[in-house]
Image (spheres, rainbow, N blue to C red):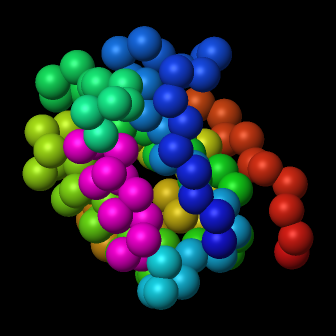
Amino acid sequence: MNFARRSGLPGVDAENPITLTVTGRVSRAVVADLCGELERALADPCGAALTPGAAVDCDVGGMIRPDLTAVEAVARLGLVARRAGHTLRLRRVPPELRALLDLVGLADVVSLEEGPEERVPGPL
């Protein structure tokens, strides 16, 4: 499981310069690390500042076999973003994760990017 923060890259909205990228299989051991990374990104005075109320992008297109642990990660990341006065917007959501979010009622809590889902090739 990998995650990264991008700031100021081409293709990233100037009003939304922070993108958290989650790839691989999400385990319970890394959920706290993901939340910590997002908290640091939102609180970093040297980093790119978000417009108040702007959405934080979370690219989950490289997630492998999303399960309820991935749903927990999304829920907790959403809470971190809300506590900082922002919303969480998921990008490139795999169909499996979208179905799980719908099933547990979180699809209305986080913003899901609409449009064709692009998957990052990865191990099966």
* Number of numbered discs visible in the structure rendering: 0
Q: Find residue 104 and report its horizontal and vertical position in percent.
A: 32, 72
The kind of secondary structure the magenta stretch mainly shows is helix
Quadrant of the rendered image containing residue 24:
bottom right
Q: Quadrant of the N terminus?
A: bottom right
Q: Residue at x 26, y 33 (%)?
A: 45
Q: In the picture shown, does residue 115 fall above or below 62? A: above
Q: Residue at x 43, y 65 (%)?
A: 34
**Image-based side of 96 in relation to 111, left or right:** right
Towards the viewer: 53 or 113? 53
Is residue 51 in the magenta section?
Answer: no
Residue 21 in the image: above or below residue 33: above
Residue at the far front in the pictured view = 46
Measured from the top left, where is residue 49 in percent x and y?
A: 29, 25
In percent of width and height, residue 90 lies at: 45, 45
Q: Which residue shows up at 20% across the image and 59% down it?
A: 79
Viewer-proximal residue, 16 or 100?
16
- In percent of width and height, residue 96 lies at 60, 66
Q: Residue at x 75, y 49 (%)?
A: 119
Q: Is residue 110 visible?
A: no
48 shown above or below 15: below
Q: Can you see residue 48?
A: yes
The quadrant the C terminus occupies is bottom right
Which residues lie in the magenta part?
Answer: 31-43
